[in-house]
Image: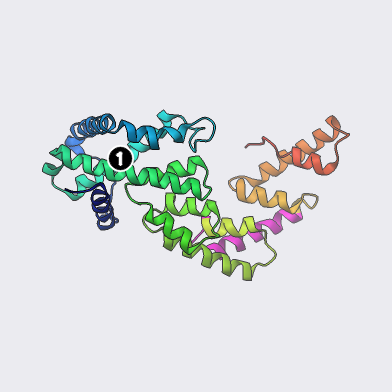
Amino acid sequence: MESYRDIIREQRGFKDTEQDRSLTGYLGKDKDYLYDRLDRNVEFLQEQNREFLEKYIDPLFNQDEGYLRQISKDSAFKVYKSGLESYLKLHYRANSRDELLSDIYIRRFIIGYTNDFLMNLKISENIGLSPSVGLEIAGLSYRNDPRLLFEIMKKYPNLDKYIIRYAVVDHPCDSIGFIEKIISNQNILHERYPDLPLSVINTASIGHINSPVEFIDQLLSQLMIFHEKYPEVDESLLLRALLSFYKDPETFILRVLENIERLKIEKPESGIHQIKKDAQHNLYI
């Protein structure tokens, strides 16, 4: 008799084979029918596996120590269901419609996806990813199984958590290649611009992964212009304006300067360092 492990192995092999298949577009005329069959089989498996749900899922939402205690069950289930529907689409694109008329076939891929969804959550918790990021990664279990997180942590044990998120969530089909490119960019930029803050290096390495040097050269050119125009403004503020408010950095700078002058009057007891810090809080343009 086929075991649970055999089903997991089969589904992971399927994902490996279909890694590059596009999921853009819709299911067409079969959409409502197939989603209905999917819902009915999810409900069937939930009913058949109540002890499993109580043992492995309910503790995630324990209000004292559950990994997802700050996320509602409804919100988490929406992420689970969205990923499962994507997995249905992947099977629909890869196989004949007749196979998806089989409840047994549908239950097999629900089991495979659910197992990897929960394992991705567990690994995300163990390596210290935030619950929201862990849930994002789990929702991509239709593409990636837990082997990816294991591989990343084994190969890059000191990798920053936010890079893991970018790699797995935004680049699920080539997470390792994405990480390698970031590390290469960081090494190049650290050597070329040794005095730049790490935040700038990381922004260029990740957000401008294919042209980080060009991005920094342009940033430094803009920084020089603002230095000359606003010599009284700290470089850290100018960099924040250029990085976080790049569409209109000058408006941000002028708003902060206005706030500084206002706070000097309203809070004369505060030091200038604290005033500059307060002037940037809750400021949006």
Crowd around label 1: few <14 · some 14–19 · many ≥20 (10 Å): many
Relative to residue 154, is residue 9 depicted above or below?
Answer: above
Which range is magenta?
Answer: 207-228
Quick check: is 115 in the magenta stretch?
Answer: no
Instruction: Point out residue 95 in the picture as x, y percentages from the top left corner.
Output: 16, 48
Relative to residue 130, is residue 235 depicted above or below?
Answer: below
Question: The residue under label 1 is which amino acid type?
Answer: Leu
The residue indicated by pointer 1 is 84
Instruction: Point out residue 148 in the picture as x, y percentages from the top left corner.
Output: 39, 56
- Quarter residue 200 falls in: bottom right
The majority secondary structure of the magenta stretch comes to helix
Q: Nearer the viewer, residue 71 or 218?
A: 71
Q: Residue furthest right?
A: 269
Instruction: Point out residue 180 in the picture as x, y percentages from the top left corner.
Output: 47, 65
- Quarter residue 42 falls in: top left
Instruction: Point out residue 62 in the picture as x, y percentages from the top left corner.
Output: 49, 31
Relative to residue 275, is residue 191 depicted above or below?
Answer: below
Quick check: is 224 in the magenta stretch?
Answer: yes
Q: Quadrant of the C terminus?
A: top right
Would residue 137 be visible to someone looking at this image?
A: no
Callout 1 secondary element: helix
Q: Is residue 89 left or right of residue 190?
A: left
Would residue 31 be visible to someone looking at this image?
A: yes
Q: Residue at x 44, y 45 (%)?
A: 122
Q: Residue at x 71, y 48 (%)?
A: 237
Q: Residue at x 33, y 44 (%)?
A: 115
Image mark count: 1
Q: Nearer the viewer, residue 256 or 136?
A: 136
Q: Nearer the viewer, residue 99 or 243?
A: 99
Q: Is residue 193 left or right of residue 7?
A: right
